[in-house]
Image (cartoon, rainbow, N blue to C red):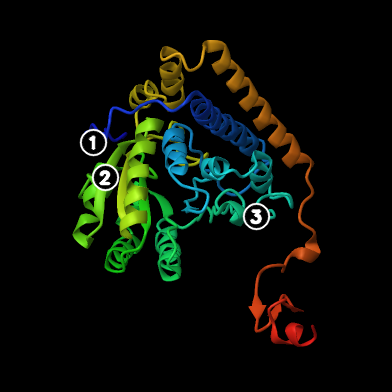
Amino acid sequence: MADKASDPPPIQRISEGQLPDPETAREWLSTMTLIRRFEERAGEMYTRAKIGGFLHLAIGEEAAVLGGARALSDRDWLISTYRSHGHAIARGTSPDAVMAELFGRATGCSGGRGGSMHLFDLQRRFMGGWGIVGGNIPIGAGFGLASSYRGNDEVTLCVFGDGATNQGTFAETMNLSALWRLPVVFLVTNNRYGMGTAIERHSAVTDLTRKGEGFGVEGMRCDGMDVLNTFETVSEAVAIARSEQRPILVEAMTYRFRGHSIADPQRYRTAEQVAEWKERDPIDSFATRLIENGLLDQAAVEQIDATALATAEAAVSFADSSPEPEPDSLYDNIYALGGEVNGQLSSNSPATKENG
């Protein structure tokens, strides 16, 4: 029987939300549309057995993805969950490299080793996709500790789902982050379900902003279906973390339009509930708002969509034509012993320095 999720708590907007300048508005809409079209094509490729393992799509959550990412500077860090294709693209990773990674190809952003759940792009300070629920939370705190130890003003955005707030790693990390005053923004994408279990059934406390307060972590909430409100709220949280050197927990109220993964039969929710949330489609609503305020016209919105479709299609072609990793590379980047990495002397080893 499908669970009937109750109405979400009210959104505490920090302002009425002034629209960004036309160039920024176009970029935000373009990137959210690209994420949507990319995810749709990835889903199709999975059903054609081009992608193996698991595949978790963020269709419906684009505003929470982009609004959070755009609140960061280039020097900040972002770490996500297994639902991270959109985060990689929002951070600047090429759609070609992301799709190739899903295909397990050598041209993927993780060299074909990580697949859907373990995307990685150090150059853009996107520290992954992580497959274990809640496993990325203490790692995000580790990045915050490194920034604090080095005395810089970098902030880490650590993204996870509502189900992860029930893990022990969440409680332990909230405590240490508050105790050590780590500059980390913990962004909970509350899409109402932990896999197939409604939040009312998996969490005794459904107001997730309160879950960190007992450990000394202030909570905030944003409308995760509204890219502008998400951006405003996460930006405020990032500013606090940066200037005051302390953690903040932000709950983004959002909803995924597809199942938990491609294999999810979705028997736990009704078609009526999904349709109701789709009326607040984050891409359509933002596009409508831009048109109504004269920042874009309908033709521009259609062109943005056409470009996104072409980019997603080109990513599929790139991935499909890319080579698989060579068998001889099976043990590359796996272990290090002393000054050796995979049996070769590293540039920092004493022997290398001694020999010039």
Name the spot of residue 191 as percent of width and height, x first: 36, 39
Q: Amino acid at mark 3?
A: Ser
Q: Residue at x 48, y 53 (%)?
A: 76
Q: Is residue 284 visible?
A: yes
Q: Earlier in the sequence, mark 3 or mark 2?
A: 3
Q: Earlier in the sequence, mark 1 or mark 3?
A: 1
- Residue at image mark 3: 110
Number of numbered callouts drawn: 3
Name the spot of residue 194 as percent of width and height, x first: 36, 46
Query: Within 10 Å of the Cα at label 1, are there few (<14), some (14-19), or many (20+) other Cα atoms?
Result: few
Is label 2 in contact with label 1 (beta carbons under 8 Å)?
A: yes
Q: Is residue 197 visible?
A: no
Query: Within 10 Å of the Cα at label 3, are there few (<14), some (14-19), or many (20+) other Cα atoms?
Result: many
Secondary structure, mark 3, is loop
Marks 3/2: CA–CA distance: 33 Å
Residue 86: mark in rendering: none
- Residue at image mark 2: 220
Q: Amino acid at mark 2?
A: Met
Question: Image quadrant for the C terminus?
Answer: bottom right
Q: Considering only vertical position in the picture, is 281 above or below 240?
A: above
Along the line of sight, which residue is nearer the eye, 35 or 239? 239
Q: Amino acid at mark 1?
A: Gln
Q: Residue at x 25, y 49 (%)?
A: 219
Secondary structure, mark 1, is loop
Quarter of the rendering containing residue 156: bottom left
Secondary structure, mark 2, is strand
Is label 3 in contact with label 2 (beta carbons under 8 Å)?
A: no
Name the spot of residue 205 as percent of width and height, x first: 20, 49
Residue 12: mark in rendering: 1
Q: Residue at x 70, y 86 (%)?
A: 350
Mark closer to the observer (1, 3): 1
Marks 2/1: CA–CA distance: 8 Å
